[in-house]
Amino acid sequence: MLLERTISQLDIGPVSPTRAAELGQLGYMQWLGALGSMADYRAEAMRAYTAAHPFIRTSPAIAVFCDLLVASTRMPIEPLPLALPARQRRGGAQARRAAI
């Protein structure tokens, strides 16, 4: 269930490469945090990749998410390029009111 939610959150269409990387990494971390403690990581990663793959062409954020899934299953194991997005102001209450 959380996998489908993560995919729908990432499938927002074209965004800048920087924003796609941020969103894809956040999506991966969200998905990873939701895995059960006894889950078979490889099987879950392949299931997530299979579910997200149809959206790769239309969503750069999902492409980053899929790239991270593939990279995490490669041998030998290497650190993934994960980072939280840089903090920045996005407009606060004024921006929320303008969006309505």
Image (tube, grey):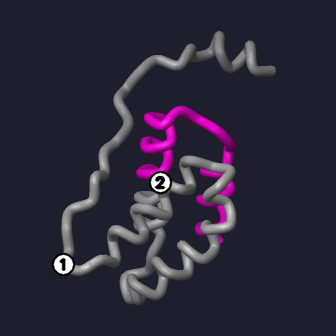
- On the image, the x and y values in percent for residue 44 come to 48, 82
Tell me which residue sits at (30%, 45%) in the image. 83
Looking at the image, residue 59 sits to the left or right of residue 22; the answer is: right
Looking at the image, residue 38 sits to the left or right of residue 14; the answer is: left
Amino acid type for the residue under numbered disc 1? Pro
**Count of picture labels:** 2
Tell me which residue sits at (53%, 19%) in the image. 90
29 shown above or below 16: below
Residue at numbered disc 1? 76
Which image quarter: residue 14? top right
The quarter in which the C terminus is drawn is top right
Badge 1, how many Cα within 10 Å: few under 14, some, many 20+?
A: few
Amino acid type for the residue under numbered disc 2? Val
- On the image, the x and y values in percent for residue 40 come to 40, 89
67 shown above or below 39: above
Residue at numbered disc 2? 64
Q: Nearer the viewer, residue 47 or 97?
A: 47
* Secondary structure category for the residue under label 1: loop
* Secondary structure category for the residue under label 2: helix
The quarter in which the N terminus is drawn is bottom right
Q: Nearer the viewer, residue 57 or 51?
A: 57
User: What secondary structure do most residues of the magenta stretch adopt?
Assistant: helix
Q: Nearer the viewer, residue 51 or 14?
A: 14
Q: Are marks 1 and 2 in contact (CB under 8 Å)?
A: no
Q: CA distance from mark 1 to mark 2?
A: 20 Å
- The stretch of residues the image draws in magenta is 1-26
- On the image, the x and y values in percent for residue 60 come to 56, 47
Give yes or no for residue 3 being in the magenta stretch.
Answer: yes
